[in-house]
């Protein structure tokens, strides 16, 4: 996994609540058996018109947000299907951070496994960032995972919470499966105990 | 110390617990399907890892399979490759697969319970958000992403932070014509689509006790639509009667022993939940969603709401956008909404009881001339059982298509999709934009409500239905 320590980038505002993973990556693109190459399909039905032409009014198609690497959206981002293709598509497209007032559980978990940082901020902080990204050209934020801060160059600063273990995994780019395999002895003991008590 | 049902199951599966780290939780059953597993198996190969417990892993092909003639090759080459890849992976790693031509094939959340693989007290995961379905048996069952699928394949464990607990207590009994689906939609309408985020729900109360296992599965299935990590119901005589004699259920002395253990799986009287929600079953009506999120739902006697009445600005914008997508005008009577398609299927509502309820409605009637309707049984076993009761004949004679088992138009990965602008009464679980096909408009309802809409061509209150003998 790509480690994540600190990131500065342009912010794109997606002022919608309950953005579900079907929007992030529609089902017709889930047939691929690879982990890569999903960025081209990100927000497909919003980015492209039914005839395949680019939808110029969608935020990510506006030239000023083309280089955005931080996405800010409204509450319950990533709800619905557990498809990890959603964070794969966001990361492959070039996003490193998603900021919202709340995230769906499975989606947030999936992001963390892919070096994509979900940052939960207060409603008013998110509203401020959305406004900044709309009003100011090339509005940038710096997200510091070590210090758990989100800052801009105009004096905005917010603190976010993240589980310490997840933070360490992201910063060090740890292989979580490798970590669990270190507990092999504990797993084997657990299995033996279960067989002994269930008799099967 | 008194514990909730969730806490009892959680505690019994702790492999390792140290401060400031997630708990390492043991997984009793890992269900696998073709869409969310190929990258996980690939990850194992790259890291030269094995599947730790192939005997606790079961696979089927459901999301991407055609529901038409199975003897024909799959037309879509990319879809066919995904199913071939599942076959190869199951063969290479020694995992039991209920393949497309097997008598046991079906939607993963339908076949698990049907085969007796799902049993009280277990931890169950699957790379699918509707894994919450299995909680109907008093199991801790939740959806995971592909990285976690790989984690469970390699270690049979998952590092997990302990979720919060929520009790949803449903008082009274459901009126005639009001089903588990309506209860689920009513709850989501009440607590909203993020109302249970970070929580495991336990459903309790008289109305829940009276539900059949099929109804309980429908209710637990939709937990994810309220944002919950999982939903569960304490096992009781209904659960035990359902399980006894199933293919993978214990037998003889093992059954007796298991039963004694399962009877301890209930929340202790003095146990505390982090949150409690009270629901009144007696006033519930059949529900219909009007928007693009399952929380956008009203009773069938209601009207499409007016966003202008909403105080919250993001909610108002979301409602306006939803109405635009759904091509609906505020204050339209729900029963005046005309439909083009009907889909009876999905892991929410494609079990035998669902098909029986729908067949009772359509018997002796024909679908409206402007409606195209289909039934997709949840599994081949459901299909056979329905056929042996003659339900297929009732549906066919009424103008419904009768298909092979799979996820089908619930997510539209195969050829079963809505055309742009088509409006569908669907027994599935998600009415998201484009979920059933780009530009398609989905209204979530119960099987009875979907069946009635197929006949009349618009939403109709099933409580006033005239049944034919």
Image (cartoon, coloured by chain):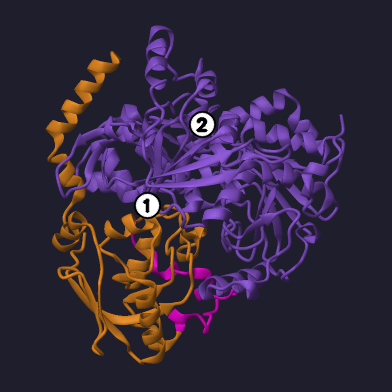
Does B228 sit left or right of B290 as displayed?
A: left
Q: Residues within 10 Å of mark 2 (few under 14, many from 20)?
A: many
* Rendered location of residue B136, percent (x, y): 49, 33
Asked if labels 2 and 1 share a chain, the reply is yes
Q: Secondary structure at mark 2?
A: helix
Judging by colour alone, the chain drawn in orange in this rendered image is A
Q: Residues within 10 Å of mark 1 (few under 14, many from 20)?
A: many
- Which numbered circle lies on residue B52? none
**Chain where mark 1 sits:** B
| Foreground: disc 2 or disc 1 | 1
Quickly name the residue at label 2. Answer: B111
Quickly name the residue at label 1. Answer: B198
**Chain where mark 2 sits:** B
The residue range painted magenta reads: A35-61
Residue at point 35%, 47% (across, down): B164
- Looking at the image, which is closer to me, B218 or B7? B7
Figure colour of chain B:
purple
**In the figure, residue A66 lies in which quadrant?**
bottom left
* Rendered location of residue B242, percent (x, y): 54, 22
Choose the circle earlier in sequence order: 2 or 1. Answer: 2
């Amino acid at each position: 996994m790509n480690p994540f320590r600190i990131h500065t980038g342009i912010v794109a505002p997606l002022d919608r609540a309950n953005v579900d993973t079907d929007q992030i990556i529609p089902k017709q693109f889930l047939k691929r058996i690879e982990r890569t190459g999903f960025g081209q399909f990100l927000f497909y039905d919003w980015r492209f018109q039914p005839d395949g032409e680019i939808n110029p009014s969608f935020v990510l198609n506006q030239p000023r947000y083309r280089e955005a690497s931080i996405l800010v959206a409204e509450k319950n981002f990533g709800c619905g299907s557990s498809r990890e293709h959603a964070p794969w598509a966001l990361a492959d497209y070039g996003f490193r951070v998603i900021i919202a007032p709340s995230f769906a559980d499975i989606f947030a978990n999936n992001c963390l496994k892919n070096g994509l940082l979900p940052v939960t901020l207060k409603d008013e902080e998110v509203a401020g960032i959305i406004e900044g990204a709309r009003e100011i050209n090339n509005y940038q934020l710096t997200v510091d995972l070590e210090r758990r801060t989100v800052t801009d160059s105009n004096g905005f600063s917010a603190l976010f919470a993240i589980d310490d273990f997840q933070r360490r995994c992201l910063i060090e780019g740890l292989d979580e499966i490798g970590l669990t395999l270190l507990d092999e002895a504990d797993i084997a003991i657990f299995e033996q105990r279960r067989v002994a008590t269930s008799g099967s | 110390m008194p514990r909730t049902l969730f806490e009892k199951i959680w505690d019994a599966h702790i492999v390792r617990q140290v401060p400031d780290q997630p708990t390492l939780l043991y997984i009793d059953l890992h269900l696998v399907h073709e869409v969310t597993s190929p990258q996980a198996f690939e990850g194992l190969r790259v890291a030269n890892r094995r599947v730790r417990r192939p005997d606790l892993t079961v696979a089927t092909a459901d999301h991407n399979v055609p529901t038409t003639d199975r003897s024909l090759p799959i037309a879509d080459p990319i879809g066919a490759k995904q199913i071939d890849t599942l076959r190869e992976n199951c063969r290479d790693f020694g995992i039991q697969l209920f393949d497309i031509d097997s008598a046991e094939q079906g939607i993963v959340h339908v076949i698990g319970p049907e085969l007796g693989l799902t049993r009280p007290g277990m931890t169950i995961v699957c790379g699918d958000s509707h894994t919450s379905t299995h909680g109907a048996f008093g199991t801790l069952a939740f959806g995971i992403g592909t990285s976690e699928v790989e984690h469970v394949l390699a270690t049979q464990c998952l590092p997990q932070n302990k979720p919060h607990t929520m009790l949803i207590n449903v008082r009274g009994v459901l009126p005639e014509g009001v089903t588990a689906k309506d209860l689920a939609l009513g709850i989501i309408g009440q607590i909203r689509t993020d109302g249970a985020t970070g929580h495991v729900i336990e459903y309790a109360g008289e109305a829940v006790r009276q539900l059949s296992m099929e109804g309980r599965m429908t209710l637990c299935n939709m937990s994810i639509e309220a944002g919950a990590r999982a939903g569960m119901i304490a096992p009781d005589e209904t659960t035990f009667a359902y399980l006894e004699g199933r293919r993978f259920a214990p037998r003889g002395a093992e059954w007796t022993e298991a039963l004694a253990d399962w009877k301890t799986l209930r929340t202790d009287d003095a146990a505390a939940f982090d949150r409690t929600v009270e629901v009144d079953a007696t006033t519930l009506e059949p529900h219909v969603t009007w928007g693009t999120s399952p929380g956008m739902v009203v009773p069938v006697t209601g009207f499409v709401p007016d966003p202008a009445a909403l105080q919250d600005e993001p909610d108002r914008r979301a409602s306006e956008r939803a109405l635009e997508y759904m091509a609906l005008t505020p204050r339209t009577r729900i029963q005046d909404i005309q439909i083009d398609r009907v889909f009876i299927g999905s892991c929410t509502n494609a079990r035998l009881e669902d098909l029986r309820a729908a067949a009772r409605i359509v018997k002796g009637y024909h679908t409206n001339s402007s409606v195209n309707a289909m039934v997709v049984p949840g599994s081949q076993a459901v299909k056979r059982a329905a056929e042996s009761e003659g339900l297929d004949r009732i549906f066919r004679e009424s103008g419904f298509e009768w298909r092979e088992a799979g996820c089908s138009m619930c997510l539209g990965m195969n050829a079963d999709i809505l055309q742009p602008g088509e409006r569908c009464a669907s027994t599935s679980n998600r009415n998201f934009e484009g979920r059933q096909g780009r530009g398609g408009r989905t209204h979530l309802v119960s099987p009875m409500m979907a069946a009635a809409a197929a006949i009349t061509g618009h939403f109709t209150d099933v409580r006033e239905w005239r049944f034919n003998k």
